[in-house]
Image (cartoon, rainbow, N blue to C red):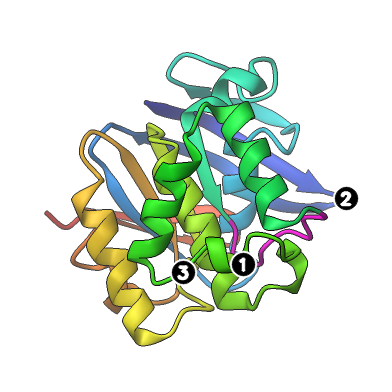
């Protein structure tokens, strides 16, 4: 599903990614770990096509994240650690997501409700004005509704209370068949029952890739 060969990315003279080789298959559920600056975020952004890399290649189901970015992003759901500064109200955001991704708004509302977020009560509020937890719940609900082949979560529970974290993992476990799940996390204890691989990065390299299932 995802093939990464000899991937290198530099920022000035610093190698954020240093000759990365990685294969990820359907059914893989991965905890991607490492200290700040290890290269995790750069790797994820390269998969999403945010960066032109200096060497090597990335293939997502045979597609190039740069040349075929629209098609690649249709296959991926991504929830960042920090919610983006979206300048839309909740209704406008749902309309945009529905039209661009073919998701029914009622499906998003169903997942949001399972996360204890009542969208109808907040439908006219700006996304920016929502609390951190509410933003995260809404983005997670959208990611689950999209039915993507690949779901990438960057510290997805950072803004969630313990009950909401439990709800998130319960719902995700019920909807993770035939997908790639990639968790960028410092909370391995949270995702260890959800993952079958642990990948550790340091100084732009993959230093361990352990099958745990």
> Magenta span has 85?
yes
Mark 1 in CB contact with mark 3 (< 8 angstroms): yes
Task: From the image, give the main secondary structure of the stretch colored magenta.
Answer: loop
Q: Secondary structure at mark 3?
A: loop
Mark 1 in CB contact with mark 2 (< 8 angstroms): no
Between 164 and 10, the one nearer to me in the picture: 164
Q: Crowdedness of circle 3 by 10 Å Cα count: few (<14), some, many (20+)?
A: many
Of badges 1 and 2, the one in the foreground is 1
Which numbered disc, 1 or 3, marks the residue that appears first in the sequence?
A: 3
Q: Position of residue 130 (x, y in %)?
A: 67, 73
Q: Which residue is mark 3?
A: 117
The quadrant where residue 7 appears: top right
Tell me what residue is drawn at x 41 percent, y 34 percent.
148
* Distance CA(mark 1)–CA(mark 2): 44 Å
Q: Secondary structure at mark 1?
A: helix
Q: Position of residue 161 (x, y in %)?
A: 43, 85
Mark 2 in CB contact with mark 3 (< 8 angstroms): no
Residue range of the region highlighted in magenta in the rendering: 80-87
* Distance CA(mark 2)–CA(mark 3): 43 Å
Which numbered tag is attached to residue 12? Answer: 2
Q: Position of residue 126 (x, y in %)?
A: 76, 63
Q: Which residue is mark 1?
A: 122
* Distance CA(mark 1)–CA(mark 3): 9 Å
Between 120 and 62, the one nearer to me in the picture: 120
Q: Relative to 77, is 38 above or below?
A: below
Tell me what residue is drawn at x 37 percent, y 26 percent.
1
Tell me what residue is drawn at x 50 percent, y 48 percent.
142
Between 202 and 155, the one nearer to me in the picture: 155
């Amino acid at each position: 599903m995802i093939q990464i060969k000899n991937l290198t990315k530099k920022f000035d003279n610093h190698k954020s990614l240093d000759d990365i080789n990685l294969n990820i298959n359907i059914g893989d559920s991965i905890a991607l770990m490492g200290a700040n600056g290890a290269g995790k975020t750069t790797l994820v952004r390269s998969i999403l096509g945010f960066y032109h890399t200096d060497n090597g290649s990335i293939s997502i189901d045979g597609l190039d994240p740069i040349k075929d970015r629209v098609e690649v992003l249709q296959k991926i759901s991504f929830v960042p650690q920090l919610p983006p500064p979206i300048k839309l109200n909740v209704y406008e955001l749902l309309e945009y997501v529905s039209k661009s991704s073919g998701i029914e708004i009622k499906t998003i509302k169903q997942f949001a409700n399972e996360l204890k977020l009542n969208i109808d009560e907040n439908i006219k509020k700006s996304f920016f004005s929502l609390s951190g937890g509410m933003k995260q719940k809404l983005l997670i609900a959208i990611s689950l509704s999209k039915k993507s082949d690949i779901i990438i979560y960057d510290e997805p529970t950072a803004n969630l209370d313990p009950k909401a974290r439990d709800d998130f993992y319960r719902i995700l476990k019920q909807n993770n068949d035939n997908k790639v799940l990639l968790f960028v996390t410092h909370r391995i204890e949270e995702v260890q029952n959800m993952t079958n691989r642990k990948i550790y990065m340091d100084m732009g390299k993959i230093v361990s890739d352990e099958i745990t299932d």
